[in-house]
Amino acid sequence: MANLIALISIKFMLFYGLLALGENETCANSCSCDWKSNTADCRSRKLKVIPNFGASSATIQLLDLSDNAIETLQSESFRNFTNLSSLHLEFNNISKVEEGAFRLLTKLTDLRINNNILTVIKPGIFVDLNLKNLYLGHNKIEHIEDNAFTSLPNLELIDLDSNFLSSIRENSFSILPSLKDFYIQNNRLSAVPTSFFSRTPRLDFLLMNNNTISAIDAYALKSCSTLKKLHLSGNTIKAIHPQGFSIPAGNSTVQTLNLEYLHMANNTFEDVPTAINSLPSLTYLDLSMNSFKSVRSSAFGSLHRLKSLHLSRINDLESIESKGFAGLVALTQLFITGNKKLRDIPIDAFPESYNLQTIFLEGNALQTLHENMLNWDNLKILQIGQNNFSCSCDLIWIQTSKLLQQSGTRQNLEKSTCALNKQTKYILKLNAVEMKCPIKQTSHNDAKTRLITGLIAASIASCALIVCLVLISCRRNVYSKYIQFKYHRHLDEALFTVEDPKSITKMFSNKSLIRNERSREETLM
Ligand SMILES: *[C@@H]1O[C@H](CO)[C@@H](O)[C@H](O)[C@H]1NC(C)=O
Ligand SMILES: *[C@@H]1O[C@H](CO)[C@@H](O)[C@H](O)[C@H]1NC(C)=O
Ligand SMILES: *[C@@H]1O[C@H](CO)[C@@H](O)[C@H](O)[C@H]1NC(C)=O
Ligand SMILES: *[C@@H]1O[C@H](CO)[C@@H](O)[C@H](O)[C@H]1NC(C)=O
Ligand SMILES: *[C@@H]1O[C@H](CO)[C@@H](O)[C@H](O)[C@H]1NC(C)=O
Ligand SMILES: *[C@@H]1O[C@H](CO)[C@@H](O)[C@H](O)[C@H]1NC(C)=O
Ligand SMILES: *[C@@H]1O[C@H](CO)[C@@H](O)[C@H](O)[C@H]1NC(C)=O
Ligand SMILES: *[C@@H]1O[C@H](CO)[C@@H](O)[C@H](O)[C@H]1NC(C)=O
């Protein structure tokens, strides 16, 4: 008997449970629902209004309304969807979002309204929400009103890609303590929105490519101490202030940004910007499609961690100066392609020892490739096609190089050609004997020669050092008087120069610097 009652009650509970389940699992006619994942799929149904799910609304976690014809989101349109975590409204025709449209959606973390026709973001919409990701890209947003984005403690990503924004004002946002990703590429920004960044203490990834930014002022990114990735390609930047990537640090010193990835292709730089040398953590740098004519000696001198450097399709690039790649000791990938005026990479372009693994050099106007430019043996990939090599003994080394052991590189080198008396020849098939190339010294002899040269150089250097020391000790008094004279003469000028015979430095006059100069004098005396 007891068993029977138990059985009946179990059946009753099951029945009731199923009923309850059924009640909460009614899908709207125009959608299809999956109650395992609590997903309502209402994509591409020509919907103009938000479908009614009755009591099931509270169960739905992902509501996909993308690709419909919704035009307006009313206040509390979604009030019954209390369990919603992800709401997709992209590819509709939304031009208006009323205040409080997403109110009460305390679990909403992912909101997509991209690819609509919004023109303005008013206050009261993105307020007091627990959003993590907010997609507003591909609208027609021209204006963001004051206090539009407030109390969004968890917001990690805002996507404003492809809108019509010409500025980002500080007042539009409250502090966004969790914001890591800010995407504002393909807009009309004419300057870096420096003050906005004072509200984004955790910013990590900033996309600002394809805007109309023409310069980077001093300390433009001073609040971005956590920024790692910066995209500025496709702007019209001609110059970066030498402190453009620095952070002022109270006392006359500066801190540096921790940027790791810097994309600045397709701008109008007329020189490799010196400001990059204040980015010691940089591992990736793209300066392709710019307007400089040459790569100066030590242009990248402080980038000791740079792994990947891109210098391609620079129409004006004619020369790389000697020691042009000095300092790049961590470089593994180098892209120098499609520079139609680049005829040579000098033999001493790489004065240190390097870890290069891949080098792409196709499509330049190179006439030769110096054997002693690099240790080519460790390279995995070398591509040198479509250049303007002239067949000469300088290229013969390639035929016996270890490079040919890498199959990809071998294939590329087999196809590479040079010109001899207007005839095209394959570099790997050049005949060294016919060309009367000198026979290469054996490496044993080579080492001996190097040892002797080294010894001679060392003895000359030590003689020179002794002479210098003697001279310095004689001239010490004269030198310190010289500095003192300059200092007194220029004391009252805003900008003064100290002509130190060893280095000529321009400095801004302020108390601490003057103090520095004083202490410098003292040490010199
Ligand atoms: C059905 O909805 C009611 C209230 O809306 C809720 O109390 C109940 O837990 C829900 N049942 C299920 C199985 O989700
Ligand atoms: C809301 O989602 C949670 C899981 O995130 C679930 O435990 C709860 O039952 C859901 N509430 C309703 C009413 O479906
Ligand atoms: C929310 O649910 C209530 C009760 O189920 C219903 O009367 C109301 O119309 C719903 N509101 C919306 C906006 O769907
Ligand atoms: C979108 O809305 C505009 C008016 O805001 C209307 O002219 C247009 O026909 C709508 N497009 C679609 C595809 O519904
Ligand atoms: C920049 O704009 C060009 C032309 O409109 C486009 O081809 C390119 O994809 C854009 N780049 C990015 C990263 O959006
Ligand atoms: C360079 O940037 C301009 C301006 O954003 C863009 O229109 C153009 O398509 C870009 N060129 C390339 C090759 O990406
Ligand atoms: C100057 O500021 C930097 C960074 O804040 C700090 O590391 C350094 O100790 C300070 N130097 C002096 C002299 O206060
Ligand atoms: C290719 O090299 C020849 C000399 O070998 C030179 O006359 C010619 O101008 C070069 N072409 C280009 C595009 O640099």
Image (tube, grey):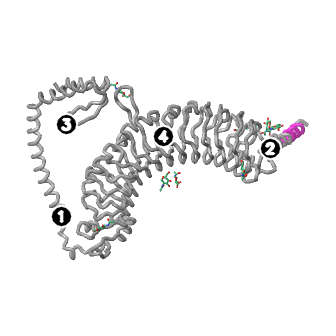
Name the front one of labels 4 and 3.
4
- Find residue 207 and report its horizontal and vertical position in percent: 51, 44
In primary-sequence order, the first of circles 2 and 1 is: 2
Find the distance from the CA under tag 3 to the CA under tag 2: 80 Å
Instruction: Name the element at disc 4.
Output: loop
Mark 2–mark 1 CB contact (< 8 Å): no
User: Does 4 appear in magenta?
Assistant: yes
How many C-alpha atoms fall within 10 Å of the one at disc 3: few (<14), some, or many (≥20)?
few
Front-lying residue, 59 or 287? 287
Find the distance from the CA under tag 1 to the CA under tag 3: 43 Å
- Which residue matches tag 2? 53
The circle on residue 502 is: 3
Instruction: Name the element at disc 3.
Output: loop
Front-lying residue, 58 or 51? 51
- Mark 4 C-beta closer than 8 Å to ligand 6: no
- Which residue matches tag 4? 191
Find the distance from the CA under tag 1 to the CA under tag 4: 59 Å
The circle on residue 442 is: 1
Question: In the rendered structure, which amino acid carries the disc numbered 1?
Answer: Thr
Instruction: Name the element at disc 1.
Output: loop
Name the front one of labels 2 and 4.
4
In primary-sequence order, the first of circles 2 and 4 is: 2
Find the distance from the CA under tag 2 to the CA under tag 1: 84 Å
How many C-alpha atoms fall within 10 Å of the one at disc 1: few (<14), some, or many (≥20)?
few
- Mark 2 C-beta closer than 8 Å to ligand 3: yes
Residue 83 visible? The answer is: yes
Mark 1–mark 4 CB contact (< 8 Å): no
Instruction: Name the element at disc 2.
Output: loop
In primary-sequence order, the first of circles 4 and 3 is: 4
463 vs 256, left or right, is: left
